[in-house]
Image (tube, rainbow, N blue to C red):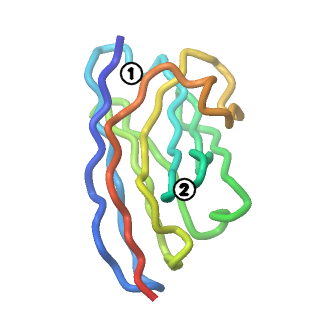
Amino acid sequence: QVQLVESGGGLVQAGGSLRLSCAASGRTFSSYVTGWFRQAPGKEREFVAAISRSGGSTSYADSVKGRFTISRDNAKNTVYLQMNSLKAEDTAVYYCAAATSRYYTITAPREYDYWGQGTQVTASS
């Protein structure tokens, strides 16, 4: 069992940057693939990025590739999402998720077992 708490969301102008954090409880955090998802009003939850258990491998949605960077610090039980060059279309509630799968390439929400409560990111144009 793991509990996830996101922070770092807010309002930023288009072109700006934000860094989201996801703090996890439990001593086995390094056993979980961790991902970020987002959900805009009226849209389905979509994959943003994921990172392997060791942090050595990452995957990204095409829409954020080159602008967002996912990383993790297993000693601090924390995963980060650095978001640069934000666009209005990045506006959404961002969720952190953890999966017991060993595959960091998983992108479907149903493949993740634990979820945080979400943090709002708004990029104004």
Image quarter (top left, top right, bottom left or bottom right) of the N terminus: top left
Depth check: give the residue in front, 54 or 25. Answer: 25
Depth check: give the residue in front, 9 or 44. Answer: 44
Q: Residues within 10 Å of mark 1 (few under 14, many from 20)?
A: many
> Mark 2 touching mark 1, by CB under 8 A?
no
Query: The residue under label 1 is which amino acid type?
Result: Phe
Residue lying furthest bottom: 125
Q: Which residue is mark 2?
A: 42
Residue occupying image coordinates x 57% and y 45%:
45
Tell me where residue 102 appears, x and y as whole percent: 64, 18
Depth check: give the residue in front, 74 or 25. Answer: 25
Residue 99 vertical placement versus 87 (above, below): above
Query: The residue under label 2 is which amino acid type?
Result: Gly
- Left or right for 70, reference 28: right
Q: Which residue is mark 1?
A: 29
| Mark 2 secondary-structure assignment | loop
* Gap in angstroms between the C-alphas marked 2 and 1: 32 Å
Tell me where residue 93 appears, x and y as whole percent: 41, 54
Tell me where residue 24 appears, x and y as whole percent: 30, 29
Residue occupying image coordinates x 30% and y 44%:
6
Residue 2 vertical placement versus 13 (above, below): above
Residue occupying image coordinates x 62% and y 25%:
110
| Mark 1 secondary-structure assignment | helix
- Left or right for 26, reference 32: left
Q: Determine which of the numbered discs, if any, sits on residue 81 in the image.
A: none
Tell me where residue 2 appears, x and y as whole percent: 34, 18
- Left or right for 87, reference 116: right
